[in-house]
Image (cartoon, rainbow, N blue to C red):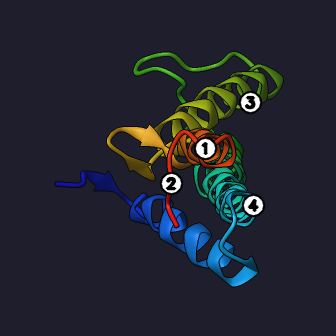
């Protein structure tokens, strides 16, 4: 049984894809290992984009929206960073809102990161296992062909 979350199943599919690429290059240890290394590179790139780049962009978009939302609260005089506390000036309110947005953005990014896993291993780190499989094939420890 394979346990994955999000698009993590794609990480597993890079192994047969790499093997088929290797068979297309030839039936030697070098070609199979080369195909697996290409599969590992693809898995690492896709995993990094899905688990790091995209969450960072989503968190930045969240921060933009939240900043404008808090700016409207400040302009209307209804901004309270904590219940019952009213900032003494507009400058203080802006500073507190800025700190609040930074903290919330970090929380959102942390929650969105590494959502695409296989057996609880993020895809970008699964590529290390695929690369190790390629080196094992290259040095003759396993024989795929």
Residue at mark 4 to residue at mark 2: CA–CA distance: 14 Å
Which label is found at residue 98?
3
Image height of 113 relative to 50, above or below: above
How many C-alpha atoms fall within 10 Å of the one at disc 1: few (<14), some, or many (≥20)? few
Q: Please say if the residues under marks 4 and 2 sit with CB atoms less than 8 Å apart.
A: no
In the displayed orientation, state which residue is furthest to the right: 91
Who's the residue at 61% across and 51% down the image? 55
Q: Position of residue 81 (x, y in %)?
A: 54, 24
Quarter of the image for residue 14 reads: bottom right
Residue to which mark 1 is pinned: 140
> Along the polypeptide, which appears first: circle 1 or circle 4?
4
Q: Quadrant of the N terminus?
A: bottom left
Who's the residue at 76% across and 19% down the image? 92
- For this view, does 11 lie left or right of residue 136? left
Which label is found at residue 34?
4
Q: Residue 116 versus residue 86: which sits nearer the camera?
A: 116
Residue at mark 1 to residue at mark 2: CA–CA distance: 6 Å
Secondary structure at numbered mark 2: loop
Residue to which mark 2 is pinned: 143
Task: Count all numbered tags in the image, as a single digit.
Answer: 4
Query: For the residues carrying marks 2 and 3, which lies nearer the camera in this image?
Result: 2
- For this view, does 104 lie left or right of residue 24? left
Residue at mark 2 to residue at mark 3: CA–CA distance: 57 Å
Query: For the residues carrying marks 3 and 1, which lies nearer the camera in this image?
Result: 1
């Amino acid at each position: 049984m394979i346990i994955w979350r999000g698009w993590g199943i794609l990480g597993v599919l890079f192994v047969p894809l790499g093997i088929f690429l290797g068979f297309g290059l030839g039936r030697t240890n070098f070609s199979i290992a080369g195909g697996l290394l290409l599969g590992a590179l693809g898995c690492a790139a896709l995993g990094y984009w899905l688990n790091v780049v995209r969450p960072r962009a989503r968190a930045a978009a969240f921060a933009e929206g939240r900043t404008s939302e808090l700016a409207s609260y400040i302009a209307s005089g209804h901004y309270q960073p904590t219940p019952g506390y009213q900032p003494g000036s507009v400058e203080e309110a802006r500073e507190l809102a800025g700190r609040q947005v930074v903290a919330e953005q970090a929380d959102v990014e942390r929650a969105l990161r590494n959502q695409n896993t296989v057996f609880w291993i993020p895809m970008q780190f699964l590529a290390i296992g695929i690369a190790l499989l390629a080196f094992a094939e290259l040095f003759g420890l396993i024989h795929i062909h």
